[in-house]
Image (tube, grey):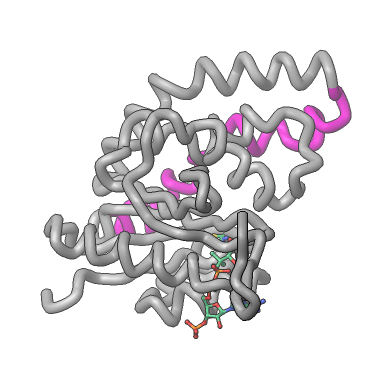
């Protein structure tokens, strides 16, 4: 690459936003793994993907976007499904066997890590059995996940992906969307608030250690 004298070249600049594609599955998994609360030291990245990102690439690509670098590689994503209740049902059929297989592998290769996380991973959707989460799904039927690869954070990609996704959901006619975020993740909470999300349930009303946030479609 040749640069003019005054060009400012940032090795980790994102370049564009597009719908997620099947070929992005491993890159999306890498983003999910690197922003997972255990960090990218977690020994079985595919399990992290099966839990939080792979389903959207395989089954909700029409409502999910990635930001890419100059090589067209995904470096951030805004994943969504427009119907959380349908998602929960489909997820348990399509992903649970893969998750169970990965948990068995983890138990064999990293028993201590398995002991630490197995319960939580097995019951990843238990929060949706809470009465007030059922109400959230009625009023805010879509849900979203946004994560950016660490080297690409703080450059406007999260904002751009969110604008893209919300425009898409609004024009699709979805009446509202929700998300779950750690109540100590101040940066992410601020980011969601600046995109129009408000706190619907705090740690005491809903999921310990988390906020459930929601946003209604504009002009409804
Ligand atoms: C939270 C996250 C999605 C934001 O995306 P991003 O590309 O880093 O953010 P942007 O550069 O688009 O900036 C978005 C907002 O965050 C603010 N921001 C950016 N970097 C920041 C930092 N280091 N500290 C505090 N605020 C910051 C920006 O000022 C901007 O605010 P504004 O809308 O008021 O201008 C991204 O940082 C991320 O993936 N973090 C780790 C994983 C995570 O927490 N995901 C959400 C879990 S539910």
Quadrant location of the N terminus in the rendered image: bottom right
The quarter of the image that holds ligand 1 is bottom right
Q: Residue at x 47, y 45 (%)?
A: 72
Q: Position of residue 132 (x, y in %)?
A: 38, 59
Q: Toward which corner of the image does residue 151 lie, by quadrant? A: bottom right
Relative horizontal placement of residue 97, taking residue 19 as reference (left or right)? right
- Regarding residue 183, the answer to whether it shows in the image is no
Q: Relative to residue 109, is residue 33 depicted above or below?
A: below
Q: Residue at x 51, y 52 (%)?
A: 70
Relative horizontal placement of residue 203, taking residue 87 as reference (left or right)? right
Q: Position of residue 54 (x, y in %)?
A: 48, 33
Quadrant location of the C terminus in the rendered image: bottom left
Is residue 111 one of those drawn in magenta?
yes
Q: Position of residue 74 (x, y in %)?
A: 50, 46
- How many discs appear? 0
Which region shows up in magenta? Answer: 110-137
Q: Residue at x 52, y 45 (%)?
A: 71
Q: Toward which corner of the image does residue 110 lie, by quadrant? A: top right
Is residue 151 one of those drawn in magenta?
no
Q: Residue at x 53, y 79 (%)?
A: 190
């Amino acid at each position: 690459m040749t640069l003019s004298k005054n060009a400012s070249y940032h090795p980790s600049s994102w370049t564009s936003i597009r719908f997620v594609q099947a070929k992005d599955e491993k890159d999306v998994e890498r983003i999910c793994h690197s922003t997972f609360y255990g960090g990218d030291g977690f020994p079985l990245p595919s399990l992290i993907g099966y839990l939080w990102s792979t389903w959207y690439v395989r089954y909700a690509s029409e409502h999910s976007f990635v930001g890419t670098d100059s090589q067209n590689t995904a470096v951030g994503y805004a994943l969504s499904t427009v119907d959380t209740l349908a998602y929960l049902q489909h997820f348990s059929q399509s992903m649970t066997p893969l998750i169970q297989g990965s948990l068995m592998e983890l138990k064999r290769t990293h028993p201590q890590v398995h002991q630490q996380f197995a319960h939580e991973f097995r019951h990843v959707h238990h929060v949706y059995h809470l009465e007030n989460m059922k109400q959230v799904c009625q009023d805010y039927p879509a849900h979203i996940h946004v994560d950016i690869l660490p080297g690409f954070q703080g450059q406007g990609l999260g904002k751009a992906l969110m604008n893209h996704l919300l425009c898409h959901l609004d024009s699709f006619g979805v009446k509202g969307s929700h998300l779950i975020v750690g109540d100590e993740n101040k940066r992410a909470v601020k980011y969601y608030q600046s995109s129009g999300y408000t706190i619907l349930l705090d740690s005491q009303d809903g999921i310990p250690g988390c906020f459930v946030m929601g946003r209604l479609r504009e002009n409804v």
